[in-house]
Structures are given as C-alpha cells and as structure tokens.
C-alpha cells in the first residue's frame, strides 16, 4: 500500500511539475523593432503598447484583477550621451532621480552585459501618489547615445516581474 501511495504521489508531482513547466513555456513573446533608432526588444505578447511622449516604446502588462491601481510596464528613452562614460552618466542619472523623483531610494546597482555591451542595472524605489514603486533601470551607451530601459512594478509585485524584466533587457539589441 505504501508503495502504491508513494508511486501515486511521485506521479502527481511529476505531472504537476511538467504542467507548470509547460505553462511557463507557453508564454508568447513579440519583438518590437525601431528602424530609425536601430533597436529591438522582445516583450510578452499579452502586453499592450501605448504611445507615450518622449518614449521610444512603452508596453504595459495586462490587468491582473478588477480595480487594479497600477500596471507593470517597460519603456525606453534614447538621448544624447554627451561624451560621458557609463559611470559618469549613471552618476548624473542618480543625481537627477534624487532631485526629481519623490522618495527616490537606490537599492542596488550592478554592471552587467547586454548583447555584449556594458550596461548598468540600477534597482530603485520611489513614491507616486499613494503607491510605492520599484524600477529596474538598464543603461547602455553606444555611438554617442544613451539607451535607458526602465521596467516598473509595484514594490509588492516587483519580485514576480523581475525575471520578465531581465528577459526583456537581455533581448535588447542595437543594430
């Protein structure tokens, strides 16, 4: 009897893990390409594209539940790099965020590679009205331009979305 019960539990566990793995793999992705700026990025196909002034692109996660106050999102801004090195541009970004973003608090920064390029990823929190938000800010400099990819979520949902943000950032390419 114990062998049958153990076998049934093992089978249930194997089916459950397999089902979860298949569910994760079924998430479709789209690729956004901007011919003028010569960039591309992949994002979940269920996310909605919005036009936002000064942003190269802006994508929002679908509503999760009725009455949801905030939708997780990503956007990119391309600006002149002003002949700054990555460390200098990051220092300037920190200063401007501290001066202009209510409750700005840097949580961590790390230098990583995206598509073979040096990138700084900064995680920070800030306040927007009655919400506490957490952003993953990816900064890449190339050919005199600064590419900033900002991935935003509520403080409480950030850890759930961070793997998605990392996959989006890893897909970023400059042609």
Image (cartoon, helix red, strand yellow):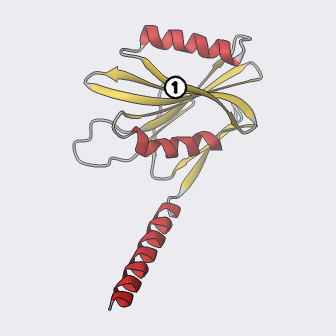
Left or right position of 157 against 22: left
Badge 1 local density, few (<14 within 10 Å), some, or many (20+)?
Answer: few
Viewer-closest of 1 and 111: 1
Q: Which residue is drawn at 69% across and 15% down?
A: 81
For the image, the number of numbered tags is: 1
In the rendered image, residue 99, in percent from the top left (x then y), is placed at 44, 7
- Residue 51, compared with residue 87, is above or below; it is below
In the picture, residue 40 is in which quadrant? Answer: top right
Q: Residue at x 67, y 16 (%)?
A: 87
In the rendered image, residue 68, in percent from the top left (x then y), is placed at 26, 41
- Residue 24, compared with residue 138, is above or below; it is below
Viewer-closest of 157 and 146: 157
Residue projecting furthest to the left: 67
Q: What element carries label 1?
A: strand
Q: Residue at x 31, y 49 (%)?
A: 64
Q: Can residue 63 be seen in this view?
A: yes
In the rendered image, residue 104, in percent from the top left (x then y), is placed at 41, 17
Q: Is residue 33 visible?
A: no
Q: In which quarter of the image is the C terminus?
A: top right
Q: Quadrant of the N terminus?
A: bottom left
Left or right position of 106 against 116: left
- Residue 29, compared with residue 91, is above or below; it is below
Viewer-closest of 147 and 19: 19
In the rendered image, residue 34, in percent from the top left (x then y), is placed at 65, 37
Give the residue at mark 1. Answer: 108
């Amino acid at each position: 009897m114990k062998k049958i019960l153990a076998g049934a539990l093992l089978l249930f566990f194997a089916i459950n893990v397999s089902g979860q793995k298949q569910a994760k793999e079924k998430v479709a992705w789209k690729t956004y390409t901007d011919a003028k700026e010569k960039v591309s990025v992949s994002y979940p196909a269920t996310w909605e594209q919005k036009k936002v002034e000064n942003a190269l692109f802006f994508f929002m996660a679908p509503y999760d539940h009725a009455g949801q106050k905030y939708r997780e999102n990503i956007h990119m801004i391309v600006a002149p790099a002003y002949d700054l090195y990555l460390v200098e541009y990051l220092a300037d970004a920190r200063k401007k965020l501290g001066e202009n973003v209510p409750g700005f608090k840097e949580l961590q920064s790390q230098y990583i590679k995206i598509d073979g390029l040096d990138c700084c990823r900064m995680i920070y929190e800030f306040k927007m009205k009655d919400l506490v938000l957490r952003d993953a800010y990816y900064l890449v400099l190339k050919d005199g331009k600064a590419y900033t990819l900002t991935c935003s979520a509520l403080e409480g949902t950030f850890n759930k979305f961070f793997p998605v943000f990392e996959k989006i950032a890893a897909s970023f390419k400059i042609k």
